[in-house]
Image: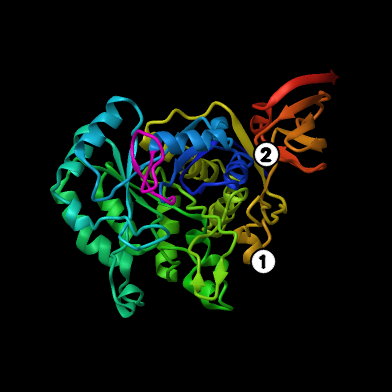
């Protein structure tokens, strides 16, 4: 079984900062990703729109430059939201929109997740001029939907938890005060969140991660599988069932892919566990596996259309991005998933950490195979995978990354072709 799909956007990804950025970006490019939303919870946070990097804050302008320099220029579109803090002003929104730099803002519950200590409570934002300006300009508000500051017994319970409290108590008030606000409820995990989004109308959408479609809290605590630990935490079977029903519903348009792929070179420490599942390089495969577990027949036209809506179309439509003209290919066949080696140390992908075999693989229309390498100057052989194609080309490639001999890049060669400095030979 082969699926030919448009390249997709990941509307919630963490590319971090520093020397490992290039490896994280390449992992996304390698899985047919055309770009998406790069989270602003760096150290320091991306809490200004313009200007140089400062000790206390970065700007979208600066972080986009760093992302592009690390290989992000190969993406078709990359959105960096403005991290909302007490220092955010309506004037930032106005200028950012006028100069074409601002496309989204991000709400973090204070201390609610990685590097969220700069966040401001939703109560302080509701009714204020910053959100009024988002309404006026149509800029998307990306929300981490959990109530902060709860005691442990209220934070996570079989009946209630931080996410259900947030969507029951905070979100109705937000939408009452700001009815024209365009909102993406990020990484929804619960039946309560799903129901809110479904009833909220077309101005509200949601991203869903592969781990929340595949797993429940039982999978996390059975053996303490810390590679599955993320925030919001995976929930119960009723919640997973609600997510699965929402993403596979006929002609649904509100739910789309946002992996929340969050790499950590050190996941578990003596003081606790870093929050985040890394799914770079394997997210489309995991989503396909999840859809099949939902009972979707990927052999049928209806099943393929449902999967393509969720992975490729709904998010692009909500954010107003054109659907990529290029595509990628998934094949129902056992796939490979390895540790991601980075300059800062190895990162464990979710399937490796969970010891789970991929039942789908990236089977692209072409492969670039590294035949020799010295630093980031490599020779690649290009080999189309179409049946009967005989084209073989050799290129000298200058890339932002180092490749090992024998490694290959799937897709249309975009991740490598952008660095081609010289075509050496070709034959048919």
Q: Secondary structure at mark 1?
A: loop
Determine which residue is flagged by label 1: 355
Q: Which circle marks residue 401 in the picture?
A: 2
Image position of 105 (left or right of 125): right
Query: How far apart are the alpha carbons under marks 1 and 2?
Result: 28 Å
Q: Residue at x 55, y 72 (%)?
A: 269
Q: Which one is nearer the viewer's eye here, 409 or 375? A: 375
Image position of 70 (left or right of 392): left
Image position of 168 (left or right of 80): left
Q: Residue at x 50, y 65 (%)?
A: 274
Q: Secondary structure at mark 2?
A: loop
Is any part of residue 106 visible from this angle?
A: yes
Callout 1 touching callout 2 (CB < 8 Å): no
Q: Which one is nearer the viewer's eye here, 11 or 339? A: 339
The x and y percentages for residue 339 are 68, 56
The x and y percentages for residue 196 are 27, 56
The x and y percentages for residue 413 are 68, 31
Task: Give the residue furthest to the front.
Answer: 55
Q: Residue at x 45, y 58 (%)?
A: 244
In the displayed structure, would residue 45 be above or below residue 69?
below
What predominant SS class does the magenta segment belong to? loop
Quarter of the image with the C terminus is: top right
Image position of 26 (left or right of 271): right
Q: Which residues are magenta?
A: 42-59
């Amino acid at each position: 079984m082969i699926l030919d799909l448009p390249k997709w956007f990941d509307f919630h990804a963490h590319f971090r900062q520093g020397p490992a950025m290039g490896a994280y970006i390449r992992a996304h490019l390698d899985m047919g990703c055309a770009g998406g939303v790069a989270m602003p919870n760096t150290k320091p946070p991306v809490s200004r729109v313009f200007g140089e990097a400062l000790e206390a804050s970065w700007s979208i302008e600066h972080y986009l430059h760093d992302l592009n320099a690390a290989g992000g220029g190969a993406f078709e579109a990359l959105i960096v939201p403005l991290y909302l803090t007490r220092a955010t002003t309506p004037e930032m929104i106005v200028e950012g929109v006028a100069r074409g730099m601002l496309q989204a803002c991000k709400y973090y519950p204070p201390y609610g997740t990685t590097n969220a200590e700069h966040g401001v409570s939703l109560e302080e934002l509701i009714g204020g001029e910053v959100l009024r300006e988002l309404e006026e300009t149509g800029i998307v508000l990306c929300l981490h939907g959990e109530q902060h500051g709860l005691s442990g017994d209220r934070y996570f319970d079989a009946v209630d938890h931080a996410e259900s409290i947030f969507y029951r108590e905070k979100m109705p008030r937000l939408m009452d005060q700001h009815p024209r606000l365009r909102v993406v409820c990020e990484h929804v995990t619960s039946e309560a969140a799903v129901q809110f989004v479904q009833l909220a109308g077309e101005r509200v959408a949601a991203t869903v991660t592969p781990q929340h479609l595949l797993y429940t809290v039982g999978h996390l605590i059975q053996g303490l599988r810390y590679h599955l630990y993320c925030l919001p935490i995976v929930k119960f079977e009723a919640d997973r069932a609600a997510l699965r029903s929402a993403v596979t519903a006929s002609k649904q348009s509100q739910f789309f892919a946002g992996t929340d792929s969050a790499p950590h070179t050190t996941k578990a420490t003596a003081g606790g566990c870093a929050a985040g599942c890394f799914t770079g390089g394997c997210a489309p495969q995991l989503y396909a596996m999840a859809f099949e577990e939902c009972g979707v027949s990927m052999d049928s036209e209806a099943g393929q259309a449902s999967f393509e809506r969720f992975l490729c179309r709904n998010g692009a439509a909500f954010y107003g991005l054109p659907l990529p003209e290029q595509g990628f290919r998934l094949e129902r066949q056992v796939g490979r998933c390895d540790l991601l080696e980075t300059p800062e140390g190895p990162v464990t992908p979710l399937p490796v950490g969970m010891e789970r075999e991929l039942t789908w693989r990236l089977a692209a229309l072409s492969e670039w195979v590294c035949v020799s390498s010295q630093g980031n100057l490599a020779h690649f052989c290009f080999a189309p995978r179409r049946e009967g194609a005989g084209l073989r080309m050799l290129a000298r490639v200058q890339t932002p990354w180092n490749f090992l001999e024998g490694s290959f890049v799937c897709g249309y060669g975009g991740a490598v072709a952008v660095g081609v400095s010289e075509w050496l030979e070709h034959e048919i």
